[in-house]
Each structure stands twice: as structure tokens, then as C-alpha cells.
Image: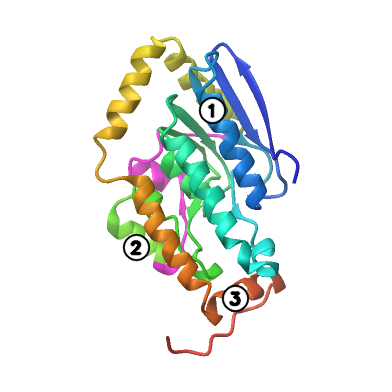
Amino acid sequence: MSRPFTIRIDDGIAEMILEHPPVNAFDSAGWMAIAAEIDALGADDRVRVILIGAEGRGFCAGVDIKELAAHPGRIVEVNRGNYETFRAIHRNPRPVILALHGYVLGGGIGMAGAADILVASECARFGVPEIDRGAMGGGAHLQRLFPVQKVRYMYFTGDFIDAREAWRLGAVERVVAREELLPAAREIAAKIAAKSPAMVRLAKEALTGIEDGNLEDKYRWEQGFTLEAYTMGDSQESRDAFVAKRDAKFEGGE
């Protein structure tokens, strides 16, 4: 996979646009490339704010399930790429704003849950279909967005919530029409970029430090359960069924 994004820097705002059609589902190399670029932007003195948006039918549909169905052993590399991307956003010295539309699933939830500010289009849908894909992960970041019981409902059922509900629950700052999404996110980014970069950097470090628990440690805990899941036949059957576009057939029991 070539770099699955474009970058531009203007007036202190670094804009990353994810571009891997149709739904921005990335393989292990793609995730590592995204993480490395976000880290680089955070170290660039020209950058005061990072804005991440996307082209295509959705912001991000997570990992490339076809890669994992064909090569289950790559789960370690995929886990690493996810971890590094979410860390690069959450621990970045610059504020990170996400402009979300369409699918926000799996790894998309991880990115959203790691970010500082979210703007969503009316078509955005949030979900964690991990159980249905034979994996774990995303719960720590989802719980940074939504209340505990809502997280468990979404995780156990695989049901999505829309942008208006995400706004009602406090995760999303603004809900706008699709054509207004990037302009709305850029407006917020410009307001932050106009402030003292030193003060904003201190503020982000302070706010991250007072959060409950360590987000990266929580996610690492979850990833251990993904590795455990990958030893189970039901996990492989979930991925095979997804790729074949058929219902999964489970033997029952644990």
C-alpha cells in the first residue's frame, strides 16, 4: 500500500486526508505509515494544530479484514500499527481535530477516541463490530467517548449510533452537513492555531495527564484479548464469513 493519505500545511494547520477507497480500511503497513506521519507533524515547528479528515464513503472502517483472513499471523503487526496510530494522536503535543463522516468503525473509533476534538457530518455512524470480526479492541477509546453502559451495549450488540446521538452524549462538538464538515473543522483549527503554541502545548499535556488511567495501557490490555481470540476457531470463522459475505457458523461452547 502506498501512503494512504495526503498532507498539506497552511497557516499552522496540518491537514491529513485519508484516501484509501472505498472505506479507508488499512492494512498493517498503512497504519504504521499513518502513525509515523502524525508523529512527524507533531514534531514540525510549522504545525500548531493537526486536522484529520477523509475521502470516500467513510472516515475509517478499521483494519483490512481481508489481510487478516488470509494472514492471521499479521495480527501482531496490525495491533502495533493501531496502537502507534492511536498513541500518536492522543500523545501528540499538538491538538488533534477529526472531521468524521460515514463509517467510523474499529480503528476509526480508536482514532476518534484518541483525538481532542470531533466534528461530524450528519451521515457519520459510530460502531465497534469487533465481536462480529473475531477480535477485541476499541473499548478503551470508545469509553473515552461514551458512558460505560453505552459502550457495553454497542460492543455486545454491534449496533451503531449516529452523529446526533454522539453529540447528545458529549463526544462530538458539532454536527454539520457533509459539505460543511471540513470548513467547520478548519474554523475550529484556525481559532486554536491563533493562540500561543507554547501555552496550547502545555494545556494539552496537562489535560492528558489528569485523565483517569492511562489510555495506552488500557488499549494494550485489550490487545492481549485480541491475540487470545485469534487462537479460537470462532475468530477465524468470523473473518472468513465476512470475506465470503455469508453468515458465520459457530459450533457453540467456549
Residue ID at (34%, 14%): 199
Tell me: residue 214, above or below residue 235. Answer: above
Between residue 147 and residue 226, name the one nearer to us.
Answer: 226
Indicate the position of residue 150 as horizontal and vertical percent values.
33, 57
Residue ID at (53%, 45%): 124
Between residue 85 and residue 179, name the one nearer to us.
Answer: 85
Look at the numbered disc 2 and give the secondary structure of its residue.
helix
Look at the numbered disc 1 and give the secondary structure of its residue.
strand
C-alpha distance separating marks 3 and 1:
36 Å
Magenta residues (range): 156-177
State yes or no: residue 97 in magenta.
no
Q: Amino acid at mark 3?
A: Gln
Q: Label 2: which residue?
A: 152
Residue ID at (69%, 63%): 66
Please indicate whether residue 86 sits to the left or right of residue 27 in the image: left
| Residue 104 in sight from this viewpoint | no
